[in-house]
Amino acid sequence: MKLVAFSTSSSTSPRPGALLDEQTVLDLTNDVAGLPPLANELDACDLAHPFLAAAQDLLQKAANPDERSRLERAGALHARNDISLHAPVPRPGKIICIGLNYRDHAEEQGAELPTAPLVFNKFSNCVLAPGGTIMIPPGSTETDFEAELGVVIGKRASRVEKADAMDHVLGYCNFHDVSARDFQFADGQWTRGKACDTFAPFGEFIATKDEIPDPHTLGIRLRLNGETMQDSNTNQLLFDVPTLVEYLSKYIALEPGDVIATGTPPGVGFARKPPIYLQHGDTVEVEIDGLGVLKNPVAAADA
C-alpha cells in the first residue's frame, strides 16, 4: 500500500487514505470505507491494529470495477487534485535522525567513519506537508538541504534483535532533513539547527514494506530548482535499517508512527565549493526510487 494523510475542502483535519492509482485517493475513514475505527491517528500506522489489514483488503477489492463504483458512490474516492496532502504521519511521536550514515557523505567531508550511529532529534513542530513551504528561520543565512530515506515504525520495538527488526517496520518515505548550518555549528549541539519549524518535510506517502522489497538498493536524489544536487544510493548506508532499529531500540522504545531519518548522501550545500544554501523562492525535490517525489518551496521568514 501507499498510505497518505489528506484533507478535503470541507474538512481540514487529516484523515488516512491510500493511493488507489496515480490520480485517485481511497478514503480509509471508518464512516466511509467501513474499516475498524481508529482511536487516534497513530493507530493507522500500527501493524497490530486490524485497520491496516482491512485497508489492504479494501484496496485489493477496489481493483474490481463494481467495488470501485460502490466506493465512488459512497464518496470514498477522491481525485488527487481535489485534496490536500499532509505529512503521512501528521504528528509522529518521535523523529529520530542519524548523522553521517552514508559512506560517500563521510568521504566528502573527510570525516572518520562512525563506529556507532550518530543520533539526534527533530520534533513534531518540524513536520511539513508535501507542497508546504520550508521557512528559513530568522537570522539564518546557511540553511541547507538533505535528502534522506525515512523509515516509519509499525510495531513497538524495545530492545529488539537485528534479526527481528524488520518485523517492526511499517514502510518507507521520502524525508528532507532541512538544517540551519550556522545554528548547528555555532551552538556546539544540533537541536536549534535541526529542529526549527518546517525542518522535516516528508511524504508524499508511506510505501509499506511489500512495496519496497529491499530498502538498501534505492536511488536517492535531491534537486534544487531542477538541478541535481544529490544523487546516490541507499547501498551506501553505513548502518542499515535493521541495525538502526536494533541500536535505537536498546535505549529508546520505538512506537508505531515514529520516524527514523536514516542520513543523507553527499552533495549537501555546506560541503560544496562554494557552498550552496537554500534561498527565498527556491524549490526543492527529494526523490527516492519507488517513493515518488517530495516537493517543497522555500521562503525566508524575515523576507
Image (spheres, rainbow, N blue to C red):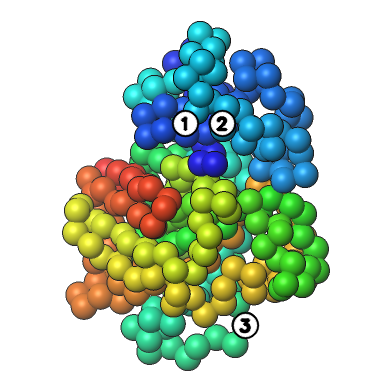
Q: Amino acid at mark 1?
A: Leu
Q: Secondary structure at mark 1?
A: strand
Residue sticking out furthest to the right: 159
Q: CA distance from mark 2 to mark 3?
A: 40 Å
Could one spot residue 88 in this view of the protein? no
Q: Is residue 131 above or below residue 270?
A: above
Q: Which residue is under mark 3?
A: 116
At a point 55% along the width and 69% down the height, the residue shown is: 98
Question: Which residue is disc 1 drawn over?
Answer: 20
Which of the marked residues, 2 or 3, is nearer the chain's N terminus? Answer: 2
Cα–Cα gap, marks 1 and 3: 40 Å
Amino acid type at image mark 3: Ala
Tell me the residue that label 2 is attached to: 59
- Residue at the spot 56% in from the left edge and 31% down from the top edge: 59
- Where 86 sits versus 119, above or below? above
Res 224 quadrant in image = bottom left
Q: CA distance from mark 2 to mark 1?
A: 7 Å
Residue at 26% in and 65% down? 229
Callout 3: helix, strand or loop? loop
Residue 97 on image: x %, y %: 56, 64
Q: Residues within 10 Å of mark 3 (few under 14, many from 20)?
A: few
